[in-house]
Amino acid sequence: MSNVALTPVRKAHRFDEAALASYLSANVAGFEGPLTVRQFEGGQSNPTFQLATPGRRYVLRKQPPGELLPSAHQVDREFRVMKALESTGVPVPAMFCLCNDTDVIGTKFYVMEMVDGRLFTETLLPELSPAERRGIYLDLARVLATLHNVDVASVGLTDFGRPGNYYERQISRWTKQYLASKTEEIDAMEKLMAWLPDNIPEQKKTVIVHGDYRLGNTLMHPAEPKIVAVLDWELSTLGDGLADLGYLCQDYHGDSYFSPGLASADLDALGIPTEDEFVAEYCRHAGIDRIENWPFYLIYNMFRSAAIIQGVYKRGLDGNASSETAKLMGDVARIRSERAWGMVESLT
């Protein structure tokens, strides 16, 4: 990850590095110290660290310190899904060890291969050529389809999520989350919460869903427009792969949180595929002829994003964040939900 910033370990996330080195010597084949630990910028949910030794670099992801919600920060699930995918065509880092013993460094953690690659977070990829942009977007579609084509049983993940009723559960979950963090009346959210449960399409098959599949959670080859690792599997489960596809494609219908999205961009000049081209590329690799009820998957994801953003907004207010920043987040939740309801109205 050549272009990802590293810092000294932040005070709140420090741990016993000698105890870690001792554990790795006993549990990771070929591990030899001395060990140098630095922290990656970002990775706020599950803090992430580079472990450097004279012969090799590793990555450690751990639960954050403090009291945790039962369903949050499940690094063991992240480890399990990536370990299962090592034998497939989905590019994931090699997994070396999972430690559930909180006595070692204070929380659960796992250690994986450090993949050499480039991280891009701006959807318009301003530093690249049109050909490179197109290549990267087409590979995003290809790799997502490859994930959704993995046979769940053959990789031992049949119990990785509940069977059936994926959207019912997700809509219920995000409705509850939104209502718990509600700060004002957003008419569009009220309408979406009523509309979505009554308009769920039939789910064709159950696949591994990443849950947060986007450009910023992939690493690109150092010199080619090709994905070498898909990261951040914290929200992964079993469900409908079209939820992942709709999550990616909502950027075609508005700005990202605080950066320009694809909606108002000159895609042809940039070399970025149109939404139709992107979806067609996914379908080609997934073996799908066509997607029925496509707007539902966009509307669902805009609703989900609005609920997530509202939660961030509420936590910001509760933490006495600056009113200017909080107001921006509040506007994003409203705008995203109004855009989604506009798509509902355009269906009739």
Image: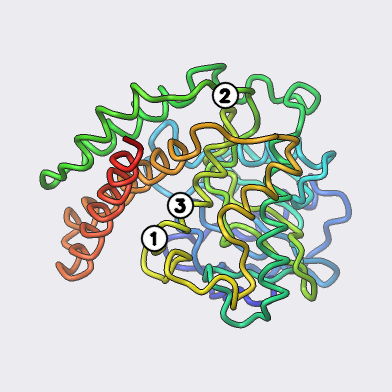
**Residue under pointer 1:** 254
Q: Which of the two discs, 3 and 2, sits closer to the camera? A: 3
Name the residue: 57% across, 24% down: 161
Q: Nearer the viewer, residue 18 or 96?
A: 96
**Earlier sequence position, callout 2 versus callout 1:** 2
Is label 2 in contact with label 1 (beta carbons under 8 Å)?
Answer: no
**Residue under pointer 3:** 250
Q: Position of residue 320 (x, y in %)?
A: 16, 61
Q: Quadrant of the C terminus?
A: top left
Q: Position of residue 34 (x, y in %)?
A: 76, 68
**Residue under pointer 2:** 161
Q: Nearer the viewer, residue 298 or 64?
A: 298
Name the residue: 62% across, 60% down: 17
For the residue labelled by badge 1, is the local secondary structure a helix, a strand or a loop?
Answer: loop
Label 1 packing within 10 angstroms: few (<14), some (14-19), many (20+): some
Is label 1 in contact with label 3 (beta carbons under 8 Å)?
Answer: yes
The image's colour scheme reads rainbow
Disc 1 residue type (three-letter) = Gly
For the residue labelled by badge 2, is the local secondary structure a helix, a strand or a loop?
Answer: loop
Disc 3 residue type (three-letter) = Gln
Real-space CA distance between mark 2 and mark 1, rounded to the nearest whole angstrom: 31 Å
Q: Is residue 202 left or right of residue 205?
A: left
